Amino acid sequence: MTETSTRGAPSASTADDYDHVAPYYDTLTAALPETNETVDFIADHAGSGRVLELGVGTGRVACPLSLRGYDVTGLDNSAGMLARLRSRSDGAKVDIALGSFTDPPVDGEFSLVYAVFNTLFCVISQNEQLRAIEQAAERLTPDGTLIVETDLPDLARSDSSGRTLNTGGVERNRVFIEAAMHDAATQRIRTQTIIVSEQGIQMFPLMMRYFWPSELDLMAKLAGLRLEARYGDWRRGPYSRDSSRQISVYRRADKPER
Ligand SMILES: C[S@@+](CC[C@H](N)C(=O)[O-])C[C@H]1O[C@@H](n2cnc3c(N)ncnc32)[C@H](O)[C@@H]1O
């Protein structure tokens, strides 16, 4: 792959990409260490009203949250991911909406809107990311909260052309490999997750646009929100130069500090 392949190159929509990954998503994310802590953190910020997850996927967070009694709506633009959510034994309590978080087809207000696990990176322009945050802010109750979790890309791991190659799980009958190409000019990273097994090779391409917390704060400010807290992990560990991710908690700027 050449570097130019990430520069303004057309990419399939994320809905197509996630439809493709949907049957494997739970396997690929099974090793995520912090799902319980994520649900605890989200529950602590849920308030007393409805909760909306942007890019709910297969319900990794929304399903356990709904089992705790929260009124959860899950929005996603991948019918395949939502079909997986619906098929879960604990998925019935989540209200589902099919559509984009840049124009959410959901009515009413929410005391919490959240987007975890790099979901806001899935729209690959600043305009779309800003639009998603504005749309979320518009749906918050007056004392509502927005939570955004994203990784902090470790660009030092790329070679001089922006490439990285990582080995994921190594099992007896299959190996998970992730190849990535970073383009600093567009803040985009194209990834290929490759599963090599006795049955053959499967490839799961994704494109994302990352942003740093400073850009996120500015987009939130434009959307009428202010940062209340930022953490480096779901256990409320400090956000610091050593953090590999950030979790930001925003409230409406017109509300007094709690
Ligand atoms: C990284 S996955 C996260 C899924 C889930 N939140 C989790 O933590 O496991 C990103 C999800 O966002 C969805 N998505 C991507 N772009 C979207 C958009 N514009 N509108 C709604 N959902 C979108 C994808 O289909 C996918 O389910």
Image: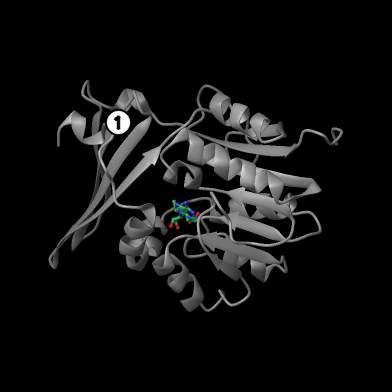
* In the foreground, 90 or 254: 254
Query: Is residue 132 positioned above or below 153 on the image?
Result: below
Residue 106 percent across, percent down from the top left: 63, 62
Task: Assess disc 1: are there few (<14), some (14-19) or many (≥20) residues with their C-alpha within 10 Å of its C-alpha.
Answer: many
The residue located at (14%, 68%) in the rendering is 199
Q: Quadrant of residue 233?
A: top right
Q: Nearer the viewer, residue 208 or 93?
A: 208
55 sits to left or right of 5 = right
In the visual, does 148 lie left or right of 257?
A: left
Q: Where does label 1 land, which residue?
A: 182
Element class at badge 1: strand
**Figure quadrant of the C terminus:** top right
In the image, 170 versus 100, the foreground residue is: 100
Question: Quick check: 146 left or right of 131?
Answer: right
The answer to whether 238 is drawn above or below residue 65 in the figure is: above
The image position of residue 158, as x and y in percent, is: 27, 27
Q: Is residue 52 visible?
A: yes
Quarter placement of the N terminus: top left
When the figure is inspected, residue 28 is found, relative to residue 221, above or below; the finding is below
Residue at x-position 57% and y-position 24%: 214
Q: Position of residue 102 (x, y in %)?
A: 53, 49
Picture coordinates of residue 103, whole percent (x, y)? 56, 52
Q: Which corner quadrant of the image does residue 228 belong to?
A: top right
As displayed, is residue 187 above or below residue 160? Answer: below
